[in-house]
Amino acid sequence: MIGENLRKLRKKNNLTMKELGQKLNLAESTISGYENGNRKPDYDTLNKFADFFEVSTDYLLGRNVTQKDIDTYNPLLDPELGIWFKDIKDASPEKQEELKLFWDFIKDKEKNRKIGDKQR
């Protein structure tokens, strides 16, 4: 199950095994072993994967996610985010496009950040 989930996440993020290995300081053959089920990641490596892909270790292990886990944080109930959403909704189409481009830039920058690198 771990291997299948790692493969799905890696492909979803358009990464090769080599690229993922470089980002996490793991050999390509190690990534391959995890994905093929020939190896099992240790606790620290499992956490590295979870942090990198922004998923829980439970997800990686194939455990069912409960409704409680889903309901833990609802961004729509956050007053500050509500204000941001309203501001974005009320912005001109040009400003909305600028915000989208900026957000895409931030996501790409974070995606390319190696585990352990500090945010700037």
Image (tube, rainbow, N blue to C red):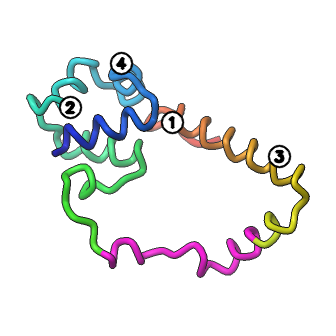
Q: CA distance from mark 1 to mark 2?
A: 25 Å
Q: Is residue 80 above or below residue 65?
A: below
Indicate the quadrant containing the C terminus: top left, top right, bottom left or bottom right.
top right
Q: Disc 1 marks which amino acid? A: Asp
Q: Nearer the viewer, mark 4 or mark 2?
A: 2
Q: Nearer the viewer, mark 1 or mark 2?
A: 2
Q: Chief secondary structure of the magenta span?
A: helix
Secondary structure of the residue carrying tag 3 is: helix
| Labelled disc at residue 117 | 1
Q: Nearer the viewer, mark 4 or mark 3?
A: 3
Label 4: few (<14), some (14–19) or many (≥20) C-alpha neighbours in 10 Å: some
Q: Which residues are magenta?
A: 67-85
Left-right relation of 77 to 36:
right
Given residues 14 and 116, the one toward you in this image is 14
Q: CA distance from mark 4 to mark 1?
A: 19 Å
Q: Are marks 4 and 3 in contact (CB under 8 Å)?
A: no
Q: Disc 2 marks which amino acid? A: Glu
| Labelled disc at residue 18 | 4
Label 2: few (<14), some (14–19) or many (≥20) C-alpha neighbours in 10 Å: many
Q: Residue at x 81, y 47 (%)?
A: 97
| Labelled disc at residue 35 | 2
